[in-house]
Image (cartoon, rainbow, N blue to C red):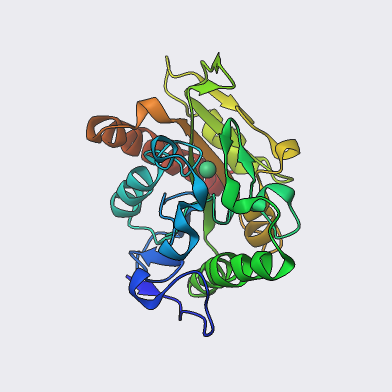
Amino acid sequence: MTSVETVSNHTILTAGEGPAAEVINPRGAAPICLVCEHASAFIPAALDNLGVAPDQRHSHAAWDIGGRDLAVALSKSLDAPLVASRVSRLVYDCNRPPSAPDAIPAKSEVVEVPGNADLSTTDRAARVAEIYEPFRALLTATLDAFQTPPVLVTIHSFTPIWFGQPRKVALGLLHDSDDTLAKAMLATAPDGLDTRLNAPYSVTDGVTHTLREHAIPRGLPNVMIEVRNDLISDPAGVARFDRILGQMLTSALQTQVAS
Ligand SMILES: [Zn+2]
């Protein structure tokens, strides 16, 4: 693991809590950069759990359940570097720009986050400086280190029940202005797996920030992958989606090269 320097004058993350972001398998040989912005439910001690109820601190509001396990498995099976956040999205959502109201949400779906209500400008700036900027810098440095331009693949999970409504979709392939890789992967989806383009979210929900910030300006093929979290909540599910997504991505990239 490599890490970014912790910022001086930090008020949120202490030295003992480690950096805001990490790279797993930094020397991975595949021309693929994996990203997991919602990999952790960790809330630094200084924030006193943000006032979030104990039963919600490891709910999907805090992180993408199973997302890190799946991303780490793909990093190993594909031999690709993975940039992952080490802090809960309730502290700062690294898939949102600082200007987004939900970058530091005072409410996430049905979960109240009292520690994010009425934040001062100074407190917001500290969240950006200590969480978002180190994540952004680490992803930038990781992309810069590739010998040949990689594809950028972000790994997410979503809750099966959203505002009380069940979701049937199992796998979502989301894109921003470049739909090439998402559509190429959709064409390789296995029979019987409910796979959809731009579900359960799409660009209009503001969820493609990482693609827009890091892939589009560099001209990198890119896709945001969303897996329903009940399908990757145990090791068998993670192994299944590691296999499925590895095959889909490999096939899609071969198709792109061939076309
Ligand atoms: Zn996510």
| Quarter occupied by the N terminus | bottom left
Is residue 211 visible to us here? Answer: no
Q: Position of residue 95 (x, y in %)?
A: 60, 52
Q: Is residue 32 above or below residue 249?
A: below
Q: Is residue 126 visible?
A: yes
In percent of width and height, residue 135 lies at: 53, 66
Quadrant in the picture for residue 128: bottom right
Left or right of residue 218: residue 255: left
Q: Which residue appears at 57% of the width and 44% of the height?
A: 113
Count of labels in the image: 0
Location of residue 42 (image quadrant): bottom left
245 versus 253 height, above or below:
above
Towards the viewer: 245 or 65: 65
| Left or right relative to 250: residue 255 | right
Does residue 203 lie above or below 42 as drawn? above
The C terminus: image quadrant? top right
Q: Is residue 8 left or right of residue 71?
A: right
Question: In the rendering, at what x and y percent does residue 76 appear?
Answer: 29, 53
